[in-house]
Image (cartoon, rainbow, N blue to C red):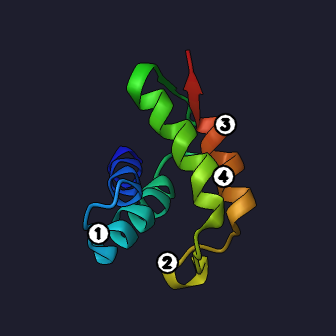
Amino acid sequence: MMAWVNLMKEKAEGKHVNSKDLKKHKNDVFQLFQILPEGERVEVTGDVADSVDSFLENIKGENIVFADLGIDSDIDTEISAIRETYVRV
């Protein structure tokens, strides 16, 4: 998540960011999330917690076709599940 957030910040600052890198990091988050055991809780703090929050706030505007990622879900369900998994402490 942090990689995607950092690239989006760079893009917003007018720096060149490869769109393939953005897409890869975005897709990686959702694909890797699928391998976590259901009900898993990960406590996060500091910059990691901030990155999770920023990712979840900003990903809503992104075009994601979950079927193309082999995921039978939608953005709202995934955001909710990620928010429940990564717990700020």
Please say if the residues under marks 4 and 2 sit with CB atoms less than 8 Å apart. Answer: no
**Circle 2: residue type:** Leu
**Whole-percent x and y of residue 56?**
60, 48
Q: Mark 1 against mark 4, which lies toward the viewer?
A: 1
Ranked by sequence position, the earlier of labels 1 and 4 is 1
Q: Residue at x 27, y 61 (%)?
A: 15
**Whole-percent x and y of residue 51?**
45, 37
Ranked by sequence position, the earlier of labels 2 and 3 is 2
The image's mark for residue 69 is: 2
The image's mark for residue 79 is: 4
Q: Residue at x 41, y 57 (%)?
A: 12
**Circle 3: residue type:** Glu
Residue that label 3 marks? 84
Q: Residue furthest bottom?
A: 68
Q: CA separation, marks 2 and 1?
A: 16 Å
Q: Residue at x 44, y 57 (%)?
A: 29
What SS does tag 4 mark? helix
Please say if the residues under marks 2 and 3 sit with CB atoms less than 8 Å apart. Answer: no
Ranked by sequence position, the earlier of labels 2 and 1 is 1
Residue that label 1 marks? 21
Please say if the residues under marks 2 and 1 sit with CB atoms less than 8 Å apart. Answer: no
Q: Mark 4 against mark 3, which lies toward the viewer?
A: 4
**Whole-percent x and y of residue 33?**
49, 53
Mark 3 closeness class: few <14, some 14–19, many ≥20 residues within 10 Å = some
